[in-house]
Image: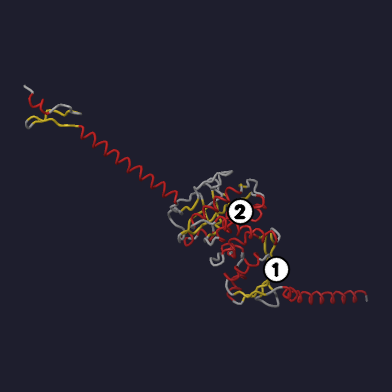
Amino acid sequence: MKKKELLCTLKKLIFIIGIVTCLIPTCVRADSTENSVSTADEFFTALSHQILEHKSQQLYYLSSEELKQQITVSQNIEEPFLYHYNPKEPLASGCYTYLTIHDFHMSWFLSRSRTLNVQMNFFVPKDTMQEYFKEMQQLANELRGENDYESVKAVHDYIIRRVEYDYNNVSTNYTDIEGFRENRMVCQGYSMASYVLLSYMGIPTRIVIGKAGDDNKRENHAWNVVQIDGKWYNYDATWDDLGGNDVGYNYFLKGRNDFPNHYPEGLYNSSEFLNSISEESYNTPTTLTNNLLHILLIVSFIIILVIVISIVMKSRVSVSYGSSVVGTVIEDDFDDTNINSTQF
């Protein structure tokens, strides 16, 4: 009897577990609003909103079978999410938002084959994230210049002067949100902070992931590309940080032919992306001024040289007798009358 009772109890337990398992999706869905998405861009934008709103869980209904197949077949959804860029709503781009979270997990509902549950873990509390974005929006308004160049330079200089590079590579300083609190960042933080400020200013920018360094030592690195006057340029605030308040410009608004030791990876290494970046570096007002001064110096030198030669030539007088030239007298002070009356 005891064995029969035990088997009966086990059957009941299995039945109850089955019922609970079936009800779990319903319970989760009751607490979550289902988002309908049909393309990868819509899905990644929705994921970005989930992050910006600091929602730890969100349901997504994939209305397109094609999208479902893309996500099902993809072995690593994080990579295309990291490359996602939304020009109409830059802050809702995976290239930024993905870097602000610790991790996320996806699971399908058995009862609805196209319903996806996405759970996320965040680095910082919701209040901290919201306070940071408010601070950055206000800061962007304060730093905004009269034109895009002045705005980009103001962001570049401000970040470099405010924070120091974290050579200890403390994990909490990998994001801009936490790095700004400590005033210490690694390259990812520099590029993320630049991205947020420029996005609030309405200046298109993207975060680029890759390697940097010489051939003997290349390390993981992140930098930006920024659009000014319709062209994209490379921008690396990390490598322009010379320490303290010293700001460099060797990696500021550089063309792809003038940006050494940077090696983008993945989508950023595609010909389509690389060709979108200007070949030549941006002609900054400082560059134009220096070029103008250089030209003025050359022209001034030429003018002075011509004047000197002219003076020297005028001071030379060729004295001739009859048809033959006897010689040249420099600074001739002889009186013409005396010369004509001279007896030979």
Extreme right residue here?
1
The one nearer the camera, 191 or 264, is 191
Q: Horizontal placement of 336 versus 259: left or right?
A: left
Say whether disc 1 or disc 2 marks the residue closer to the N-terminus. 1
The crowd level at tag 2 (other Cα within 10 Å; few <14, some 14-19, many 20+) is: many
- Within the image, what quadrant is residue 188 found in? bottom right
For disc 2, the marked residue is 189
Q: Position of residue 189 (x, y in %)?
A: 61, 53
The residue singled out by tag 1 in the image is 57
Q: Quadrant of the N terminus?
A: bottom right
Q: Examine the rendered structure and indicate whether residue 320 appears above or below residue 7.
A: above
* Kind of residue sitting beneath label 2: Gly
Residue 174 x %, y %: 64, 53
Q: What number is the disc on residue 85?
A: none
Name the residue rendered at 36%, 42% in the picture: 297
Mark 1 vs mark 2, foreground winner is 2
Residue 49, located in which quarter of the rendered image? bottom right
What amino acid type should be assigned to the residue bearing mark 1?
Gln
Query: Can you give x and y, in whole percent of width and height, for residue 11 in the image?
Result: 84, 76
SS class, disc 2: helix
Tell me if 335 is positioned left or right of 64 in this view.
Answer: left
Camera-side residue of 72 and 249: 249
Q: Give the total number of marks visible in the rendering.
A: 2
